[in-house]
Image (cartoon, helix red, strand yellow):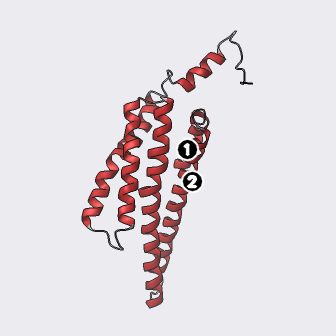
Amino acid sequence: MLRIGTAVVIFPIVRRQNEELALGYVTARVIECTFILVGILAMLGVITLRNQVAGASEGTVAYTLAAIKDWTFLLGPAWVVGWGNGLILGYLMYCAELVPRPAAWLGLIGGPLIIVSGTAVMFGGDHPSNTQHSLQGLATIPEFLWELFLGVYCTFKGFRPSSPILRADAREDRPGAAPAVAPA
């Protein structure tokens, strides 16, 4: 749920850049967390079945629940993240200049890599080869670095005050500054 919290907290800031994409980012985080929650519930079901006397039908149900967990983690953290945190947030941060632009490129590059590798694993059959898993692991590196950078940078430095969307606020907050006038 921390993922949803970070999206909700950042929404009022990035919506100044593009409200539709900011809402898309929050939506992507909610969908990602929903997939993760369904996967966790499936695993709790497997644990419950394991603690009971297992017959053939329970084994089938446990196998099905394990498959559901695999799909939810492939669709959530391994695919939706590429859209939400990679492409959408990377683009918003790049355009708004809230973080250094070269860092935002990590998200803009990492997002599509996760989407492509996740799609390849999804359509690669029921049992992805070790090559597909290692390629997916490599494709995750830029997105991992993007998320790590964003958390560390915002914790210790905050958003860049020179960002155009933050400078507009600073001008309006100054004593004696004329209020912003909506275009006619």
If the image is split into quadrants, where does the C terminus sit?
A: top right
Q: State the CA–CA distance, disc 1 to disc 2.
A: 9 Å
Q: Position of residue 51 (x, y in %)?
A: 46, 79
Is residue 63 shown above or below 32?
below
Report the residue at 41% width, 57% height from top: 78
- Disc 1 vs disc 2: Cβ atoms closer than 8 Å? yes
Q: Which residue is mark 1?
A: 7
Q: Residues within 10 Å of mark 2 (few under 14, many from 20)?
A: many
Q: Position of residue 26 (x, y in %)?
A: 57, 47
Q: Secondary structure at mark 2?
A: helix
Q: Would residue 150 be found to the left or right of residue 133 on screen?
A: right
Is residue 115 shown above or below 163?
below
Q: Position of residue 5 (x, y in %)?
A: 57, 45
Q: Secondary structure at mark 1?
A: helix
Report the residue at 47% width, 65% height from top: 72
Q: First in sequence: mark 1 or mark 2?
A: 1
Q: Which residue is mark 2?
A: 30
Q: Quadrant of residue 12?
A: top right
Residue closest to the far left: 131
Name the kind of residue labelled 2 in the image. Val
Q: Quadrant of residue 132?
A: bottom left
Is residue 63 shown above or below 89?
below
Q: Nearest the camera: 54 or 183?
A: 183
Q: Quadrant of residue 23?
A: top right
Residue closest to the far right: 184
Q: Would residue 40 be found to the left or right of residue 12 on screen?
A: left
Q: How many marks?
A: 2
Name the kind of residue labelled 1 in the image. Ala
